[in-house]
Amino acid sequence: KDPDDSATLTQPDPVPDFTKALRADALKGKRIGVPRRVFLDLNDNGRGDRKEIIAAFEKALDVIKELGATVVDPADLPSAEEIKTSKSVTFIMDTDFKVDLEKYISNLISNPSGVRNMADVIKFNDDHPDLEKPEGFEDQSMFVPLSPIVLFIGVTRLNDSLKRSEATPGRDAAFFESLALNHDLGATRGIDAALQKYDLDALVLPSDGWTPTPAVPLGFFSSSTPVHPVHPGKDRKPRNPQTVYPAPGLPFGISFIGTAWSDYELVGYAYAFEQKTKTRIRRRAYEEAVPRTQLRDVVNMG
């Protein structure tokens, strides 16, 4: 538990020893659902470039079956279509980014730049382009102010980026209404509803957009290179000069998804899959890129 994090403080006691979840047979006898509707639609928003990823994901489902799990397919979220059109997540992230950034800055022991808030960060970047705006990365659209109307009607994307807007009013009534809606769509009528309806232990999806996108394994691209989808539709331009998408052998992950505080079980499922496939070390650019650290090596180090 983190005393500065209200989310982790709500987890039940005792906090489990996650190293004990690292079992190669963790998926045996489990029921894993595949929420296809919306999340795996090939033609959703013109995203035909997902064909290679979905083909690899289908093979991953076969591995999960080999490990003794029952794959329930499909196991759709009742709220899937509403999640697709909802703007609550974007509004929450826009607001949280501004508020939490300012809180983070206020707790710095040393702050040589003198920035105190989002507006200061934007100005600092503009005043120091040699430090903060390398060629091809000049855009500050994620910081640029947007009107509340724009935020609510959903025009909150530029090249598929979330805009953390300086114009957001903070954690006001509208923010908490969005937070409640987000919980209803994502948990009550989303993940939890699907788990209960299909009697599941977890859900599984590829991590290429709707679920968290993994960092590029060191050695495939430069360590600072993000991998994100390009803008849907006819505009196939990369988000920045180093982004390569789609591309043969593009690394992506799969995400096991469960109810709140089911992390112990999810870590076990992921570990079992990883130990069976060794996918992350099958393709490596050079020896230094091979991971040699496991969860048990870093838990409780501090």
Image: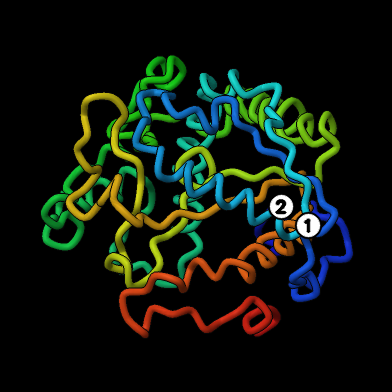
Taking the spot 72% from the left edge, 57% from the top edge, the residue there is 266
Q: Distance between the residues labelled 2 and 1?
A: 5 Å
Amino acid at pointer 1: Gly
Label 2 with label 1: CB-CB less than 8 Å: yes
Task: Residue 75: name its quadrant.
Answer: top right
Report if residue 136 is visible in the image: yes
Rendered position, 183 above or below 65: above
User: 289 or 297: which is nearer to us?
Assistant: 289
Point out which mark residue 65 bears: 2
* Residue 154 image offset from top left, x and y in percent: 42, 20
Point out which mark residue 125 bears: none
User: 260 or 201: which is nearer to us?
Assistant: 201
Relative to 73, 175 lies left or right: left
Q: Is mark 1 on a helix, strand or loop?
A: loop
Relative to 167, 279 lies left or right: right
Taking the spot 29% from the left edge, 46% from the top edge, the residue there is 245
Quadrant of the snapshot with the N terminus:
bottom right
Point out which mark residue 68 bears: 1
Taking the spot 31% from the left edge, 64% from the top edge, the residue there is 224
* Residue 142 image offset from top left, x and y in percent: 32, 39
Relative to 97, 176 lies left or right: right
